[in-house]
Amino acid sequence: MRVTIFGTGYVGLVTGTCLADVGHDVVCVDIDEGKVAALQRGEIPIFEPGLAPMVRSNHAAGRLDFTTDAAAAIARGEVIFIAVGTPPGEDGSADLQYVLAVARTIGRHLDRPGIVVNKSTVPVGTADRVRETIAGELQARGVDVTFGVASNPEFLKEGDAVNDFMRPDRIVIGASDAHVIERLKRLYAPFNRNHERIVVMDVRSAELTKYAANAMLATKISFMNEMANIAERVGADIEMVRQGIGSDPRIGWHFIYPGAGYGGSCFPKDVQALARTAQQVGYRAELLQAVEGVNERQKHHLFELIRRHYDGDIAGRTFAVWGLAFKPNTDDMREASSRVLLQQLWDAGARVRAYDPEARRETQRIFGERDDLVLCDSANAALVDADALVVVTEWKQFRSPDFARLRATLSDAVLFDGRNIYHPDEVEAAGIAYYGIGRGR
Ligand code: UGA
């Protein structure tokens, strides 16, 4: 099938590439000429394992192209995806200006029947606004063509996006028109081979499904962070508690890891946006507000542990920080807990020597040059002249450090483990003071 995708961010680029990989004929549209030119050369603007070679091979095979020419892309696409950003507006609600701008562009150029599919995370009711916007433009041009609008939210995780797309748990199609449903089922047939993964529903339910999924996952994390804070105070170890509850299939092992708080481009934004949607329809979403509140507090927790250990005497000290990205396997720093920690350390007069395998450039872009930040080339380099180590992101390479070396290098011999990746006994046996999340030490 001929597919057009607006937006070459995470969602658009992964969607376009994976659809091309199963044989569809895809063109991705972006307004950024530099980005389009780079993609045509096979340069990927994001760090996403496995994506770059797929972009190159599908581009070389002629199934995947990139353009700024929206008119031509609309003229050829049977299915037109909207996969542009929905950043939070000032009041926390999703800003739809980019989605609606694409809808206007589609309305200005559509001249034969088409299917418009929204993949961006958008508040319930947006598909209706997209439909009205396109219809308005068509009417202004005096063009009478039929088109369908569907919602098809994306559930991919950064760092595992290709795998999530190629082997989805479910494919949610929100549409009411039988023809639209049939075409989208065909589009996704290659991903739906061994058992039925396609869930068809009405548009509004599909739009809410996306928010409900992210809000549920964020709730699990905030719940565990709350438990960790209670565990700390009653002398229990949250890691034992986690193992004690995860085995219950009703609770499950996933997303029950306490830590320095959740970040990224989705959970913080989506929880807020959903709470805002609820408020707009006259419902106070107390649980969602608490989920967000607990997470905000949790982002300050590592600094609290540090402050307590040093009895507030932090000025002039140097902290090695391992991991800056909001999670491993990405260079994404959006809403990362490290940003809160770094700012608090600087405000308290400390210096930071940081290492992240991928987020160095992003960190530099965000914080610029400053005397109290040294970005290092390796985990060991970050330890040089440091008084203490703080682990913020659980990259695999941080999992088994040489504790004797840590002991010898860190002048205060103390480790703050923001993701509970070490065994306290092992750290302490090496003569290093250990602080984790919710472990009573
Ligand atoms: C999330 C969802 O997991 C995807 O299903 C969804 O499609 C995506 O948002 C989206 O809406 O686009 P992502 O933001 O890439 O994906 O990252 P996650 O792997 O979900 O991690 C989010 C944050 O939660 C990270 O900061 C991570 O460290 C934290 N986390 C995760 C915990 O603190 N504890 C856990 O047990 C799990």
Image: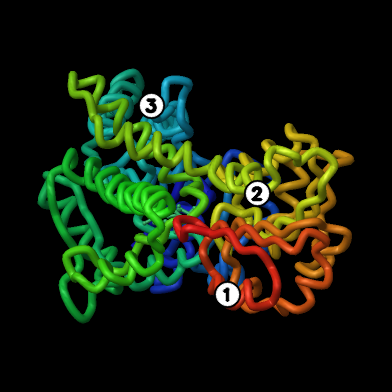
Who is closer to the viewer here, 93 or 413?
413
Label 3: few (<14), some (14–19) or many (≥20) C-alpha neighbours in 10 Å = many
Residue 199 badge? none
Name which residue lies at 43% across and 40% down.
268
x and y percentages locating residue 202 in the rendered image: 13, 44
The residue closer to the viewer here, 423 or 180, is 423
In which quarter of the view is residue 426 placed? bottom right
| Residue occupying image coordinates x 19% and y 51% | 180
In front: 3, or 76?
3
SS of the residue under disc 3: loop
What residue is shown at x 73% (from left), y 32% (from top)? 347
| 145 over 51 or under it: above or below | above
From the viewer's side, name the closer residue of 41 and 85. 85
Q: Residue at x 65, y 53 (%)?
A: 324
Q: Quadrant of ligand 1?
A: bottom left
Label 1 is placed on what type of residue? Ser
